[in-house]
Amino acid sequence: MNIRKSQGGFTLIELIIVIVVLGILAAVALPRYLDLSTEARNAACDGVFGAVLSQAAINIADPSIGGFGVAGTTAQAIDIIRDADTTLTSPADGQVAISIGGVACANNPYTIPADLVND
């Protein structure tokens, strides 16, 4: 009695097709992922700049918070915002340079509107 055991498995052509399909998916998805990460970094930079603008407006509106009010500089406004991953510098008054995770933002330096800091 000769019992034949059938061996299960994939043929070589099936494996090649799967590898090709995965390669196509990776080729399509990778550029989109990289573009999304760039957009996310830019959005994070814009969010930090929004926080700087908000803090500057608060300092101008209520001088008792920072003690400098209208006479405050950009450096004083950004000094209040702290984050372990975010670095803010003021290359000139009215400007903010933002770095997140050691990478400078694409839109550096951001400019705070003159009417916000001079009113």
Image (spheres, rainbow, N blue to C red):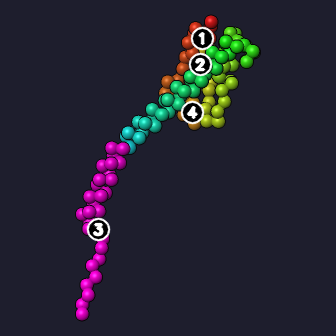
Q: CA distance from mark 3 to mark 1?
A: 68 Å
Q: Are marks 1 and 2 in contact (CB under 8 Å)?
A: yes
Say which amino acid is labelled 4: Ile
Nearer the observer, disc 4 or disc 2? 2
Residue 100's disc number: 4
Q: CA distance from mark 1 to mark 2?
A: 8 Å
User: Is 26 left, or right, of 38 in this rendering?
Assistant: left
Quadrant that contains the C terminus: top right
Question: Mark 4 packing: few (<14 Cα in 10 Å), some, or many (20+)?
Answer: some
Query: Label 2 belongs to which residue?
Result: 53
Query: In the rendered structure, which disc, 4 or 2, sits on the residue that comes first in sequence?
Result: 2
Q: Are marks 3 and 4 in contact (CB under 8 Å)?
A: no
Q: Position of residue 17 (x, y in %)?
A: 26, 58
Secondary structure type for disc 3? loop
Q: Which residues are magenta?
A: 1-29
Residue 116's disc number: 1
* Residue 91 seen: no
Nearer the observer, disc 4 or disc 1? 1
